[in-house]
Image: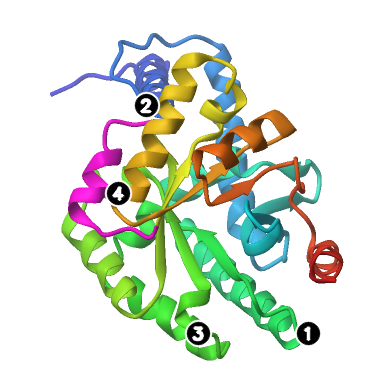
Amino acid sequence: MLFIPNDGQYGKIFLKGDIAMYKTRKNDNNKLQYFNNCMNGEMRLCSNMKRDLRNAIENEEFFLCYQPLIDIRIKKVVCMEALIRWKHPRKGIISPMEFIPIAEETGLILPIGQWVLKTACSQLKEWHDMGYNNFGLSVNVSVIQLQQPDFAETVSRIIAENRLLPEYLELEITESAFMESARTVARNLNSLRKRGIKVSIDDFGTGYNSLKYIQKLAVNSLKIDKTFVYNIKDDINKVIIDAIISLAHKINAEITAEGVETKEQYEYLKKKGCNKIQGYYFSKPLLPEEAAEFLKINSD
């Protein structure tokens, strides 16, 4: 029998152990992690965010921005990427980098992800009805969503409800998608591709699993991570970019470069045969009304 003194010391020790374990998981490593008092503050913030996330959908605190993907040859919009933002009632705008990992941990990513798909598809239908119908939509999906056996059916239903053609939707996945429940993930993605929905690998080249995607799934597009584009002056990054573009062309996939901010980056990518670019060189992420104005200007 374990004796726990009534002063609560063991309880504090166990709590500190849990906090240190959480910190290790958050940093995505297996290194030994010692507790320090600063972690108490982080855990309180995390706990508060979990609580607030549960209310965010009902309170309509999420909204979407849309960043154009530009055909590098004709400088026309061929796609809009839907990007979620959270307008917290007290903290203001919270980056998805802060709340998406927590949403995945709690399972809240499922209703949030479904809301993103529904809202983005509804917005695309509205733009198409306005006459801007020569472009599609890309949406990031979480590995948690991809692990759901009915994910493909959910996506197909949302497309049908908005009377959109499947080829107008592209799902962006990251390399972590095949780390768990690989068969379910592959089954969902292959089912969606057979229905005409496109699949893109986001942040390509940053992880050891990237090439495994190509073995398991015939993807439509590869997306060069912005870290390579930012430092395009470095010879090693040019070599990596050249290799990714060459690989994409050999497997009949389109190539998109994200994080394009300068003319130098644009000209290099164009010369090397990149198909699409995304970044502040052409446009920041836009609110729906701003995106409509951008489409109007670029369609004239």
Amino acid type, callout 2: Asp
Name the mark on residue 56.
none
Q: Is residue 237 visible?
A: yes
**Spatial separation of the CA atoms under disc 3 and disc 2:** 39 Å
Q: Is residue 208 magenta?
A: yes
User: Residue at label 4?
Assistant: 250
Secondary structure found at label 2 = loop
- Residue 60 picture location, percent across and down: 72, 66
The residue indicated by pointer 2 is 28
In the rendered view of the protein, which quadrant contains the C terminus? bottom right
Amino acid on which disc 3 is placed: Leu
Is 105 inside the magenta-drawn segment? no
Q: Residue at x 65, y 55 (%)?
A: 70
Q: What segment is highlighted magenta in the picture?
A: 206-220
| Residue on which disc 3 sits | 165
Circle 1 sits on which residue? 130
Q: Earlier in the sequence, mark 4 or mark 2?
A: 2
**Quadrant location of the N terminus in the rendered image:** top left
Cα gap from disc 4 to disc 2, whole angstroms: 33 Å
